[in-house]
Amino acid sequence: MIKLLRMAVFLLVLSAEVYLVVVLGEKFRLVNHFSYFTVLSNVIAAFVALLGVFSPVSAQLRGASVLYMATTGIVYAVLLRDVDVQTPAYANWVLHVVVPILVIVEWLLRPERTTRVWTWLAFPLAYLIYTLVRGPIVDWYPYPFLDPRQHGYGDVALTCVSVAVIFGALAYLVSWAGAKLAQRNSPVLSHD
């Protein structure tokens, strides 16, 4: 069951990515495409899921994937649901809703204890720095809430702090849930 779920995650991400390339056609820009946190988090999730089909994957890597996908789903629901991010409907639904849910379900079904959850935050921080440095150079931002051209850097900073709080809280929630559920699912040793 878990391997089928992992394979489904991989195939859904692959299908959404291929769909995006085909539907966008000449409008598809590779560097801009891989400048979306959604795309990067889904590619990480697909890679982790595919690895998990064939061999064990570290709890740290799985936990990070869950964190990135949970954040992708929440940020989409809170900040992007009614915003046109130029993503065709199928890919939008799969990458922002379906895959985040499946990755979270997979974690809940096969929880693991993790440590050093703060290391998971390095990737989102690097992504933020990349986006804010690249944006003014190419005059393009992947998300409206990271674009300072309309409301200034103060609004961007406030949004970034809010998202950072979400990331931090979710990191500890993923770790806590993994530890509690793994403990509950582990066999109790008899002391006879």
Image: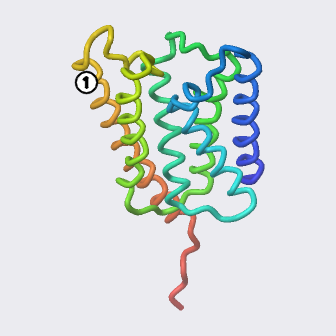
Kind of residue at disc 1:
Leu
* Position of residue 40 measured from the top left corner of the image (x, y, whole percent): 55, 37
x, y percentage for residue 116? 37, 60
Task: Return the residue found at the far left.
Answer: 154
Please name whichever residue, 51 or 187, is drawn nearer the observer in this view of the structure: 51
Across and down, in percent, residue 105 comes to 61, 44
Residue occupied by mark 1? 158
Front-most of residues 11 and 146: 146
Left or right: 70, with 93 as reference point: left
56 sits to left or right of 146: right
Q: Residue at 58% x, 36% y: name it.
A: 100
Question: Counting other residues with Cα less than 10 Å from the Cα at mark 1, is it few (<14), some (14-19), or many (20 or more)?
Answer: few
Tell which residue pokes out farthest to the bottom in this image: 192
Q: How is the image coloured?
A: rainbow
Q: Outermost residue toward the front?
A: 137
For image coordinates 47% across by 44% down, the residue present is 67
Task: Using the image, determine if residue 1 lies above or below residue 79.
Answer: below
Q: Dot 1 lies on which element?
A: helix
Find residue 129 and report its horizontal and vertical position in percent.
35, 36
Which of the pair 109/169 is nearer the observer?
169
